């Protein structure tokens, strides 16, 4: 039908001697070798691994320092029980960060999660006794998705800046949480209330497994699905994606829906784990989720990053929180330290870029 | 002031980006630097401007050797680079942009005094704009002139221009040459990269031709011809392939009962960008749109690409009446793929891989059960790469690293292989070297031969004439002439477009 394709297919022998790159490469994989001839393939594969190593240096190095520090300071740090505590404690942030990753990779971000998480928690709390666990969960997630839909519509069609819109929604959803809860902490008394806090395989809580499954599925979907790859394209150059005829608006809106749905889901899980719903649950997830994604190597300009990095970032933040709690450091110091770690880790990766660049230049001259 | 370049080299690993290039330029001389993409032109000017350190060699100004540690040093010595992509401060005034950094020695910046000081430089090059206007109000061509005024304010003695005319219309380019003539009279040396050979022949004194990093020739342009320049750039016998492409296009057997792929009837835009335009394009035809900037040809492109829906008139695609196309997605559903004119800003995600850029518009094609198959993407990439003779290191390298010609090939392929019946192309080969350009022209002729309809707009007169089967000329929002066959000449196109200057 198209002779160009046919002629091309008929001469595979002329294809450059390019070995197919290893599977599982990020679509945004950055390769240092400048336009060298295809013959430079072997060296290129080696430098790819080096690059990968260098890329995880920032968060990896920080994580290593943090682990060494805590294991020296604490006898009971590397115990099964404590690792379980870290993972269980990271479930809420992890679930929120999964949604946030989609938005940041797509070139956006969502500040409203810190309001949607508590809203999800109190909505779940008030619906649970009336409707039972499963309907309450579904309705909670639907409420979250609804908030995300409004955010998405305002940003794409209202053309109001995402920072302002999600900041506004943060305030609205956070305030709504107080209204729904009447400003109070409510105990969850329904028999199924503690479902997400129940013990599940490997000593982890059900809610933690929800995070793990969501992260794996969400990660694979981001990396391999047409939708996920389109998110990368839009993050890489939104105007180009639009001119190519991609459904840019639909994908952007769905990102906000996904993020807010994850946040509400996380809020419900958190309430279930605590056996109480309060409008103060998870108000810190806005900055922490963005911090986790950025720690994981994503660029706020979009198009770069991935779920595995986000998970590493979530675990790093969770480990710090856990270690500091064990050291009985007051929680307000935690916020300071978390902020410092974020800056140090991102600073490492900047230094790494500079180092990689200068060694690249040296090698070339 | 004489610029002497001796044995200048730049090595990356074991490739020579620049190998022992030497030349001398005298005051008031205009030197064209020619060569295919990757020949070393940009490397040369970047070294001179202190952006890149050389591996070996020396540069002397008036016998005084120069050191190259930073662009700042080069500026101090009076060497100014005006890059292809201008960097200026959009929200500041024209005067502030001209005097940026020095602020004319003022401590407290007074806009009025600044404008007064900037006026001297603006007048010197005949830049006629309100100096208090913000930069964002200027056209690209005017911004370039501001850059030149800025260079003068810094006492530039050598001005390096990297493809200054690539994004200019012919009228604007002509204007730029007048300014360069003024620089020449002031004794400024101009080094000038261009792919437009006619320009070079008319407006420069000497041509330095680079090939694979080596200088292969340097002679007075008065002694040169287009064929000689191309011959030296390519390094083979001078078979200029552009006319051949056009011949291949028109020599195609015409389909019986030519179906109208696109029909516009009395299409207008309310703002006046397009007035009562009626035109028909048959399937498999390559139609060029030409005119002075803003005369309506761009508006036709935008209408068909879904960027500016028309307000009045009828649009038919493939014989089916269509409502005004409201978005590129809408246009795509109607069977129109669009190749934007600014490939870096509108066409590609520069930090993403070659493969990703190629497949992004139609990922669904490589997916089964929603999972995109890397293997199938890679196979497709390799097929396209060999078909288009792409020069690259790996399909996963960021597209930023490729030359303009190779980037353009990938952008075009990403739309051609969508296999829509209609292809709308804004500037098919802007900023692309001669070799890649004739390859792209041949490719488009082949695509059209399969029945795909191609409509393109270009600011390059030569391309307008050689690539098109039929050339539609616009003036003040109206379609004023349709040229084909023997009438389709550069002279006719220019006179129809209402341009005043002589044919070069």
Image (tube, coloured by chain):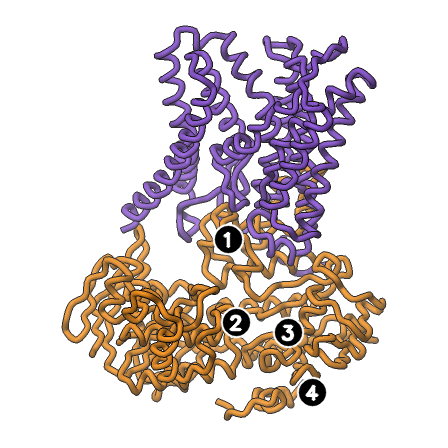
Chain colours: A purple, B orange
Q: Which mark is residue B480?
A: 4
Q: Which mark is residue B137?
A: 2
Mark 3–mark 4 Cα distance, whole angstroms, equals 15 Å
Chain letter, disc 4 residue: B
Comes first in the chain, label 3 or label 4: 3
Comes first in the chain, label 1 or label 3: 3
Crowding at dot 1, Cα within 10 Å, few <14 / some 14-19 / many 20+, comes out as some
Residue in the picture at 30% in, 71% down? B104
Residue highlighted by disc 1: B350
Q: Nearer the viewer, residue B115 or B212?
A: B115
Secondary structure under tag 4 reads: strand
Chain letter, disc 1 residue: B
Mark 2–mark 3 Cα distance, whole angstroms, equals 20 Å
Crowding at dot 4, Cα within 10 Å, few <14 / some 14-19 / many 20+, comes out as some
- Position of the N terminus of chain A by quadrant: bottom right
Q: Which of label 1 and label 3 is nearer to you?
A: 3
Residue in the picture at 57% in, 16% down? A88
Residue highlighted by disc 3: B298
Work out whether A16 lies above or below B139. Answer: above
Secondary structure under tag 1 reads: loop
């Amino acid at each position: 039908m198209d002779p160009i394709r046919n002629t091309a297919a008929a001469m595979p022998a002329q294809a450059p001697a390019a070995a197919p790159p290893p599977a599982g490469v990020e679509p945004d994989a950055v390769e240092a070798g400048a336009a060298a001839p295809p013959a430079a393939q072997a060296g290129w594969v080696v430098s790819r691994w080096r690059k990968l190593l260098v890329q995880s240096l920032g968060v990896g190095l920080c994580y290593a320092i943090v682990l060494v520090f805590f294991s020296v300071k604490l006898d009971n740090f590397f115990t099964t029980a404590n690792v379980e505590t870290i993972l269980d404690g990271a479930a809420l942030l992890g679930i929120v960060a999964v949604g946030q990753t989609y938005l940041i990779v797509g070139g956006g971000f969502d500040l409203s999660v810190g309001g949607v998480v508590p809203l999800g928690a109190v909505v779940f709390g008030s619906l649970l006794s009336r409707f039972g666990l499963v309907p309450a969960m579904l309705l909670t997630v639907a409420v979250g998705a609804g908030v995300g839909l409004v955010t998405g519509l305002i940003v794409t069609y209202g053309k109001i800046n995402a920072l302002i819109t999600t900041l506004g929604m943060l305030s609205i959803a956070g305030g709504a949480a107080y209204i729904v809860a009447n400003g109070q902490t409510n105990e969850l008394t329904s028999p199924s209330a503690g479902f997400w806090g129940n013990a599940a395989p490997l000593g982890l809580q059900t809610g933690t497994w929800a995070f793990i499954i969501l992260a794996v599925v969400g990660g694979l979907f981001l990396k391999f699905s047409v939708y996920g790859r389109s998110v990368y394209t839009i993050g890489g150059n939104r105007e180009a994606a639009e001119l190519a005829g991609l459904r840019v608006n639909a994908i952007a809106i769905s990102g906000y829906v996904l993020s807010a749905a994850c946040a509400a889901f996380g809020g419900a899980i958190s309430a279930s784990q605590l056996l109480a719903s309060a409008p103060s649950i998870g108000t810190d997830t806005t900055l922490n989720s963005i911090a986790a994604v950025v720690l994981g190597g994503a660029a706020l300009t979009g198009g770069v990053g991935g779920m595995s990095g986000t998970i590493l970032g979530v675990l790093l933040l969770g480990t710090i929180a856990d270690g500091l709690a064990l050291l009985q450091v007051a929680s307000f110091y935690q916020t300071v330290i978390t902020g410092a770690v974020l800056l140090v880790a991102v600073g490492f990766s900047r230094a790494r870029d500079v180092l990689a660049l200068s060694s690249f230049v040296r090698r070339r001259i | 002031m004489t610029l002497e370049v001796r044995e200048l080299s730049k090595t990356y690993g074991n490739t020579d980006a620049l190998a022992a290039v030497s030349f001398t330029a005298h005051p008031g001389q205009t030197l064209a630097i020619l060569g295919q993409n990757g020949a070393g032109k940009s490397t040369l000017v970047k070294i001179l401007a202190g952006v890149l350190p050389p591996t070996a060699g020396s540069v002397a100004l008036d016998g005084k050797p120069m050191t190259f540690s930073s662009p700042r040093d080069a500026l101090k010595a009076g060497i100014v680079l005006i890059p292809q992509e201008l960097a200026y401060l959009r929200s500041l005034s024209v005067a502030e942009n001209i005097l940026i950094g020095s602020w004319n020695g003022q401590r407290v910046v007074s806009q009025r005094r600044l404008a007064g000081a900037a006026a001297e430089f603006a007048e010197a090059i005949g830049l006629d704009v309100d100096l208090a206007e913000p930069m964002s109000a200027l056209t690209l061509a005017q911004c370039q002139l501001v850059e030149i005024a800025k260079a003068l304010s810094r006492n530039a003695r050598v001005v390096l221009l990297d493809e200054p005319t690539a994004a200019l219309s012919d009228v604007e380019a002509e204007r730029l040459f007048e300014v360069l003539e003024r620089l020449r009279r002031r004794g400024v040396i101009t080094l000038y990269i261009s792919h437009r050979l006619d320009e070079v022949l008319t407006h420069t004194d000497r041509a330095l031709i680079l090939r694979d990093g080596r200088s292969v020739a340097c002679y007075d342009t008065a002694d040169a011809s287009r064929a000689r320049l191309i011959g030296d750039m390519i390094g083979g016998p001078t078979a200029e392939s552009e006319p051949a492409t056009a011949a291949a296009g028109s020599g195609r057997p015409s389909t019986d009962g030519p179906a109208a792929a696109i029909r516009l009837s009395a299409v207008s835009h309310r703002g006046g960008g397009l007035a009562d335009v009626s035109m028909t394009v048959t399937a498999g035809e390559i139609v060029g749109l030409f005119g002075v900037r803003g005369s309506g040809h761009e508006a036709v492109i935008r209408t068909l690409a879904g960027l500016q829906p028309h307000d009045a008139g009828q649009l038919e695609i493939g014989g089916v009446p269509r409502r005004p196309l409201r978005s590129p997605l809408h246009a795509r559903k109607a069977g129109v793929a669009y190749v934007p004119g600014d490939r870096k800003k509108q066409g590609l995600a520069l930090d993403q891989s070659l493969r990703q850029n190629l497949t992004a518009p139609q990922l669904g094609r490589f997916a089964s059960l929603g999972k995109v198959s890397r293997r199938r993407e890679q196979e497709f990439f390799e097929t396209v790469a060999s078909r288009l003779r792409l020069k690259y290191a790996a399909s996963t390298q960021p597209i930023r690293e490729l030359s303009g010609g190779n980037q353009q090939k990938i952008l075009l392929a990403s739309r051609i292989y969508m296999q829509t019946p209609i292809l709308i192309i804004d500037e098919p080969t802007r900023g692309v070297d001669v070799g890649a350009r004739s390859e792209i022209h041949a490719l488009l002729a082949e695509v059209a031969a399969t029945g795909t309809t191609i409509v393109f707009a270009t600011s390059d007169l030569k391309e307008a004439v050689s690539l098109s089967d039929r050339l539609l000329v616009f003036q003040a929002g109206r379609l004023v002439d349709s040229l084909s066959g023997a009438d389709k000449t550069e002279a006719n196109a220019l006179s129809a477009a209402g341009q005043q200057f002589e044919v070069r």
